[in-house]
Amino acid sequence: MNLSTFRLVLAVSAVAFALGGTVVRAQAPAAAQAPAAQAPTTQAPAAPTAPASDPAATQPPAAGASPAPSSAPAAAQAPAATPPATAQTPPAQTTDSFGDEIKLEAKKVVLVKGTANWDNAFDTLIDSFKALSTTLDKQGVKPAGNGMIVYTSTDDNGFTFFAEIPVEQEPKTLGKGMSIGQSPEGKALKFVHRGSYDNMDNTYEAITNHLDERRLEAKDTFIEEYLTDPLKTAEDKLVINVYVPLK
């Protein structure tokens, strides 16, 4: 995985969201055309039927004929109620946080420090989570929260990080390189990433844009909280909270 965008996240400008905005605007006229399609259904043929019923009012069969035209317009109006219902479905997808200001609370964690290069980043992170999970499972210690990756430094070759799993009960023994510590705390912005880890670049570019637009200064640390277990979830189904601590 190429995470070069992460190294330049405070300096790179993104256009992904600008393109996204174009798509939204292109869809708006489509919704506006829905009423135009309904205009023909409200034709004044109802008016001609009224005079026709007057002369035929003396005839008994005319009474049976009048319900048929009245029910036809009612049937024509039924489809008109469906477009608004379908038009309201997309907004339900826009519930994820993007740049919400929050306060991170410190948690007791079992952690292990690691290094990775840009090409095998995700595999290295998965191996770290496996090592932590195995240590906890062997001692019957249950996680008290979602696994996290805290990025601490980067260079042209790779990056260093802490893989962390929150716990309430400390394990009696720890694996190689493991220790007990605390997760980051303080003021931060929250973003949500959905999908493959390979697409994290797009998320970090969007984060960069957001910071630039609001003229916010971030610390040299980024935190990824895995809401879906990366050991059991298909990579394209991942849901990850990205926290950007602010100075």
Image (spheres, helix red, strand yellow):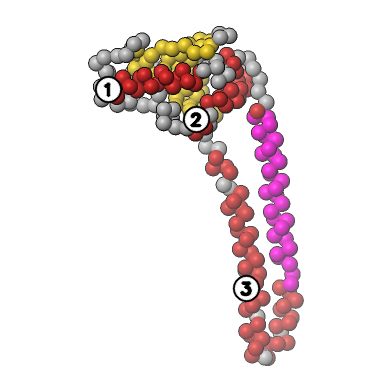
x, y percent for residue 97: 52, 31
Q: Which residue is mark 2?
A: 235
- Indicate whether 52 appears above or below 169: below
Residue pictured at 58% horizontal, 53% vertical: 85
User: Which amino acid type is marked by label 2?
Assistant: Glu
| Element under disc 2 | helix
Q: Quadrant of residue 108?
A: top left
Residue kind at label 1, given as amino acid type: Lys
Which secondary structure type mostly characterizes the magenta part of the structure?
Answer: helix
Q: Position of residue 122 (x, y in %)?
A: 49, 21
Pick the front one: 85 or 179: 179
Distance of label 3 from label 2 (alpha carbons): 54 Å
- Marks 2,1: beta carbons within 8 A: no
The residue at which mark 1 appears reads as 138
Three-letter code, disc 3? Ser
User: Residue 236: which numbered mark, if any?
Assistant: none
